[in-house]
Amino acid sequence: MFLAVKLSSTRMRNSSRKVRQYMGSMTHLLNENISGSSLVKIYNAQNQESDKFFALIQTIRQQRFKVDMASAFNMIFVNILIGLSLASVVYFSATYLTMTAGEFLSYFTAMGMLVKPAKSLININKPLQTAMTAGESVFGLIDEPQEQNSGKKQLKDVKGAIKFNRVSFGYTDQNNVINNIDLDIKAGQTIALVGSTGSGKTTIIQLLAKFYSPKSGSITIDGTDICEFELDSLRTQIAFVDQNVRLFNDSVKGNIALGQIQNMSDEKIENAAKIANAYDFVEALSEKFDSQIGEDGTKLSGGQRQRLAIARAIAKDSPILILDEATSALDSATEKKVQAAIDEMQKNRTTIIIAHRLSTVQKADKIIVLRQGEVIEQGSHQELLSANGEYASLYKHQFN
Ligand SMILES: Nc1ncnc2c1ncn2[C@@H]1O[C@H](COP(=O)(O)OP(=O)(O)OP(=O)(O)O)[C@@H](O)[C@H]1O
Ligand SMILES: [Mg+2]
């Protein structure tokens, strides 16, 4: 009996694991299709997506079937085993043993009483195996290595001088996305990163915020390697407008005062919205700053979302400001206004601007031009135009 249970348990566990994986994929697929339903419709992708769904359902059905088959096999095997043992007791006691009717009856009843517990043992095996595979995924997640936070130093009175010393990094072991980058940004300077798409601009600022660590080289703030800082302390110093604006399913207020909703005054929130040119549209919403903006801000336009993200960075009021394509969704009139606000913010702050539209980076103290993860030129707008290299040709392209 033990052998039968052991054999079927392995089979049950493998299939249960697969059922769990495919159920995860199915939830993901459903989520993607519901939130992206307009995309599916406009590209006429209904058939392609429903084929994926049916293939998943089919696999889940097969694997569930295997689990049930293994469990049923167990049951049959045990029932036969129990039947055979009862029959052999009757046979041997009748043929070879001399028992009184009373002795036989008590012996047989005792045997009969073993049937139920034996069956229960088998019945418990299926939920046990399923629960064990569920446990595997939960414990797998719990056992994921934590973000390295071995630094102890706290950043205080940050001036904001940033240096990259021969930094290389790649998302995989094989390929480097950033190669031997040297950057020297003085405290309070504004620098711009430009370069074709995929050249590594966003990666550079992800390294600065320590979402990833360089493979080689070092990054310092005010002369200290960022590895030595405690993560919270480091990230408090950085305000960030992401290239892909992310908003939370919360009120306008909750989104602007992200992480500080308990202690940020309404006045500060409104002021940040005014500077980011978001105040007027927020006031026009039915519940103004308390209006809910929907999942990822779906109730707002692209430009409105971007202005909320800028307001959020303004409200954070950190000594290092990073703007990754922060004004790309704005019309040129609004962009001009927001740009003026950003210019104002840059005072007393170290600012890194990433932009494809070169009109937004001309005033930077230094423009750094990247190509395939390497710095190919740097200097002021005028210097780079006179050098007549990559930047000058990009500039001519955009303005002719
Ligand atoms: N999370 C990631 N995992 C693996 N590769 C990535 C990841 N993020 C970016 N990459 C790769 O790294 C390279 C640099 O990407 P990065 O986002 O830094 O470019 P970028 O200069 O910001 O481009 P863009 O102007 O389009 O925003 C690209 O080749 C990209 O495919
Ligand atoms: Mg980018």
Image: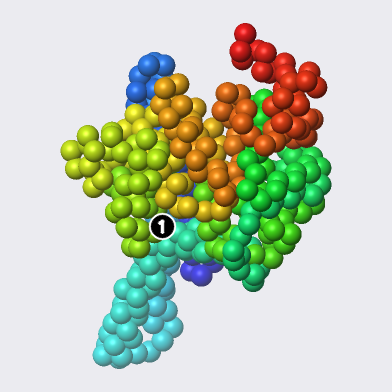
On screen, residue 186 versus residue 15, left or right, reads right
Q: How is the image coloured?
A: rainbow
Where residue 81 sits: x, y (%)? 43, 67
Q: Name the residue: 63% across, 48% down.
A: 188
Where residue 272 sits: x, y (%)? 38, 46
Q: Name the residue: 35% across, 19% down.
A: 41
Q: Name the residue: 45% across, 52% down.
A: 316
Where residue 98 sits: x, y (%)? 38, 89
Q: Name the residue: 79% across, 49% down.
A: 165
Q: Quadrant of residue 86?
A: bottom left
Q: Is residue 363 above or below residue 295?
A: above
Q: Nearer the viewer, residue 68 or 104?
A: 68
Answer whether residue 319 is visible to the viewer in this image. Answer: yes
Q: Quadrant of residue 197?
A: top right
Instruction: Kindly state the secondary structure of the residue where label 1 is placed.
Output: loop
Identity, as a three-letter code, of the amino acid under mark 1: Gly
Say which quadrant the C terminus sits in: top right
Q: Nearer the viewer, residue 187 or 65?
A: 187
Disc 1 crowd rating (10 Å Cα; few below 14, some 14-19, many 20+) is few
Q: Quadrant of residue 227?
A: bottom right
Answer whether residue 55 is visible to the viewer in this image. Answer: no
Where residue 215 sits: x, y (%)? 77, 50
Q: Which residue is mark 1?
A: 259
Disc 1 within 8 angstroms of ligand 1 (CB): no
Residue ranking furthest to the top: 400
Q: Nearer the viewer, residue 188 or 39?
A: 188
